[in-house]
Image: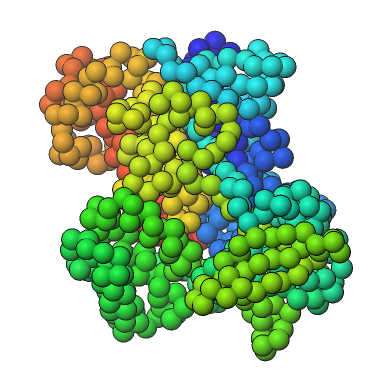
Amino acid sequence: MSGTGMGPRVLIVGAGLAGTATAIRLLRFARRPLEVVLLERRPDYRSAGVAYHRDGNPWDHVFNIQAGRMSAFREDVHDFVRWANSEADRRGWPEPWAGFEFVEEGPAPRRIFQDYLIDRLAEARREACPGVVLIEADGEAVDLEVRSTGVDVTIDQLVGEGLAGGPGATVLPADHVVLATGLELREPPFATEVRTHPSFVRNPYSAAGVRKLTALPPEATVAIVGSVLSAYDSAGLLLRRGHTGPIHLISKTGTMFRTYPGGHEHGVIRLPCPKTLLEPYRNRAEFLARVRAEWEQACSTVARNHPEVDPGVVPERVAKAWEPHLPEAIERIPSDELRGLLDEFGTAIAAFRVGAVEYTMAIIERAMRPAGGPVELVVGKVEGVTPLESGRLAVTVASSGSGERQRIEADLVVSNFGRESDYSRVGGPLWRNLLRRGTAVPHGRTGRGLEVDDQGALLTPEGEPAGPISAVGVLREGDEIVRNGRTGAFTFNLAAIKNHSIAVAARAIEQLELREDGLARNMAEFGGHVSNIEEAVHQGFEEAVVLEVRRLATRARTERELLDSRLEACIGSIGELPALPTDAPRRGLLIRTVVNRVAVERLTDVSVTPRQLRRQLGIVNAEDLEV
């Protein structure tokens, strides 16, 4: 179905972080001819998305987490820091970054991540197997129609090498579609009167928003709606440019993110199941009382038994340790109550799960001390923003406790990013059409993201696979919460995307190869016969899994081909397995599919840190042994 005529086509809708990461995995994993089309409607978002594109991220915007956690690959912890120090083109970089030595626990500018992803995608393209090609296309996908042969994708203004596009709509057939559309903006209800006002910034990560912030007189009064990461970026940008006027951080809950301690490393601690959370749900007050009691006990346990853990990091360790137990606890909460809890405590949960680096937080914390400093935290809900004759804006804030109203007059009002997580409210043509057709369904339990299966395939209203269509990133937010117990930004951030990209790319290639070889039915029968895939382990099976893990984790084509040859020989030595065809080629292909599934499970194991994962998988290097 591909334009090259050499193999099947996988079309990725969205070329930001999630789409680019999935394309890299497809290019690395594919052993047969394959055409990967990476479609993006906004060229400036390519290999970046809203979070990392250069126009919306001045040099003062740094990652909220440490540079050492920004590798695009779980199996190669140091890749981003290594690239930034040894491979990045620093021509045009300003000081201090031009001569900066990046370290694992330190900061890094967010905008350079776009260059990093561009370089890694180019490398994956060069190192792909013969016949595996990448086409980077511009255009907007507006509809998907599932057919027996694949998916017809309607694209407006399609432009791509070898693709028959042009003005108007083009229907491009694909064998598999990956949806990686990223964050959707929610229009804030408080800004109805000022959306187009020159003193209002709707999107602080837009080029226009950055221009307004950097052009502001230093004595101007600024109101920033929100008190978490996007607010810190805007406030930090102003302060580093010498802003002296009042900056009001307006927060409904008053939540402030904590600063990571120096030398902080991600870690995983084992804690017992919080058993009282598994009791029947009675009401919100009673449930929250149980949560608080269990939480305080767990934090005390970590502080007592793990004195090496900084007190500021204890909540993060507990939140991570609870992840395996949360799906069972969530099952007991009625859907309406679950949505209400997520709405009310989403920001607090996010703050427990992640912090921000000192580079971001220190300048804001200094500006808040002593009382009367330029930065002030205002606790309350923004009810409205109205224009004044003077050209300024008036922000009305209702106190969360007393309900008393406060009016703040500002020269500039900056909205928080305000993403829309309920896809029944997203106004784009793609989502309107997918929901109308029943190809996509908003997540029922949480109202966040879409209904997907355990591999990220879209589900219909009846709970059946919608076709060869997968989702990565924020589209799986609700499923990550209820299926995996992920919380806060970990439902859709880089950590989640790393795993999504591995699993989706591997499953797409598996389905294409089984279909091409006429083995899809055999695999379904074998999967049903072996309920636990590792029950099928015979002599050589574990060795085959280790080889496949290494192949999937290897960047150079020659090394992958060598590992592939060893893997084929190893599979040939495996004894008979139940429910498999007796002819050697078909039997070998099905065993390889099972081996690949187990390898993917191991690569995406979130019960350990990435560094621990490398050691478990036997792919450590000198950098890992230094710590």
Q: Compared with residue 68, is residue 89 higher up or lower down, i.e. above or below?
A: above
Residue 391 relative to residue 502: left or right: right
What residue is drawn where x is 67% and y is 27%? 138
What residue is drawn where x is 46% and y is 26%? 436
Q: Report the colour scheme.
A: rainbow
Task: Write down the quadrant of residue 332 in the picture.
Answer: bottom left
Q: Compared with residue 197, is residue 546 higher up or lower down, i.e. above or below?
A: above
What residue is drawn where x is 19% and y is 67%? 275
Residue sitting nearer the eye, 239 or 580:
239
Q: Position of residue 362 (x, y in %)?
A: 65, 77
Task: Write down the quadrant of residue 574 in the picture.
Answer: top left
Residue sitting nearer the eye, 277 or 612:
277
What residue is drawn where x is 42% and y is 31%? 440
Q: Position of residue 213 (x, y in %)?
A: 79, 61
Instruction: Please give the count of numbered marks on the rendered protein.
Output: 0
Q: Position of residue 123 (x, y in %)?
A: 61, 37
Residue sitting nearer the eye, 178 or 79:
178
Q: Position of residue 411 (x, y in %)?
A: 80, 66
Q: Compared with residue 583, is residue 294 higher up or lower down, i.e. above or below?
A: below
Residue 10 visible, this angle = no
Residue 49 visible, this angle = yes
Residue sitting nearer the eye, 243 or 384:
384
Residue 228 relative to residue 503: left or right: right
